[in-house]
Amino acid sequence: MDFAYSKQERRFQKELHDFLTKEVPTDIKSRMLGQIESESGQAFQRDFIKKLIEKKWMAVSWPKEYGGQAKPAIEQLLYAWELSYFHVSPGQTGMSVVGPTLIHFGTEEQKQTFLPMIARGEVTFCLGYTEPNAGSDLASLQTRADRDGDDWVINGQKIFTSGADRSDYCWLAARTDQSVPKHKGISMFLVDMKTPGISVQPLITLAGYRTNITYWDNVRVPASRLVGEVNRGWYYAAAALDFERIALFPWGRLEYEFDELVRYCKGTMRGGKPLSKHPEVRKRVAALSIEMSAMKLLAVRAAWMIGRNRIPNYEASMLKMFATEFQQRLSNAGMQIAGLFGLLPDGAPHAALDGLINYRYRYAVMPTFGGGSSELMRNIIAQRGLGLPR
């Protein structure tokens, strides 16, 4: 079996890398430290999106009729990997979750309305999935959508609605039938976040970045914003989650963190020699390098399946679980190698990697349950991949 990229794929990867090296400022760590939401960070994102549009790179694997370039799924993976290495992933939810699901299940009107806007970077989305009593068991959600004439009226509460304070639309899951088994009474909606009745409350996390609680009070949504068929939303959300688990946490940034840790070890002296010369450090970094390679192969496998019109089901769960737990192991290793210097935050004198180790150590907790907990991923792998009983 040949695991190497083709000549065309390597050429595309090099073109991407050269472009990003030229166009993206070198202060990657400032973006990884959560500063991309600053005014200057947002201004950079807007200018960067324009450059991607000029290169026709905003939706590289989508069909051309929807603003894409119809490139193979492997090249889409390389695109996402390279952008996330530089920590620039504009339109992430729209590109990776909403767009692919609309292509498969959306009405023609929804495709014609939303897909070109997503491809041009003109619209942003947040995810309205999780509720206070419906996390990994998403089918237990209680937010309701009741039909009233030409509208659906939505009432309920969502939590961890990241980006709700700055998104144009919400990709919302709501219960449309109370009388059927919980998996069969859910529908998906495209909700304009400017609609009256939506309120957004900030929720600050351990890592210091903002997510949100959203409240939905008699929010009226036109019937044309129902995605696909009524009560089929669970199946659409499940397909979207498989795409999300591949793309919601772009894995190239983990390679950047690993490269930064290697640089730190080579440039930091302890006991009269670089950390990279200490046997225990070398052993730890070598093990992480092997895991990085395994993570890449899992990502390529999922992209290969998408390229053959197969939805990666348990394969996406394998990637999501392995990558997020690897991120924790990588962050733990960085903290242990840096020692007390790893505890220092951004801006403190002598902070290891300018505070990156401190920040990512706090951040690494979230991805293991955001987008589906590791426990849920193991259940999916066991049941759907290995055929084990519930």
Image (cartoon, rainbow, N blue to C red):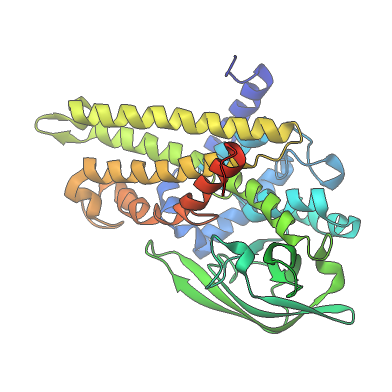
Is residue 285 shown left or right of residue 214? left
Q: Nearer the viewer, residue 41 or 321?
A: 321
Is residue 30 shown left or right of residue 384? left
Residue at image position (65%, 18%) is 6
Q: Which residue is at the far top?
A: 1
Residue 311 pos. (x, y %): 70, 40
Residue 336 pos. (x, y %): 23, 43
Residue 378 pos. (x, y %): 50, 45
* Residue 207 visible in image: yes
Q: Nearer the viewer, residue 87 or 197?
A: 197
Q: Quadrant of residue 256?
A: top left
Residue 350 pos. (x, y %): 21, 50
Is residue 18 shown left or right of residue 347? right
Q: Nearer the viewer, residue 28 or 158?
A: 158
Q: Quadrant of residue 33?
A: bottom left
Quarter containing the N terminus: top right
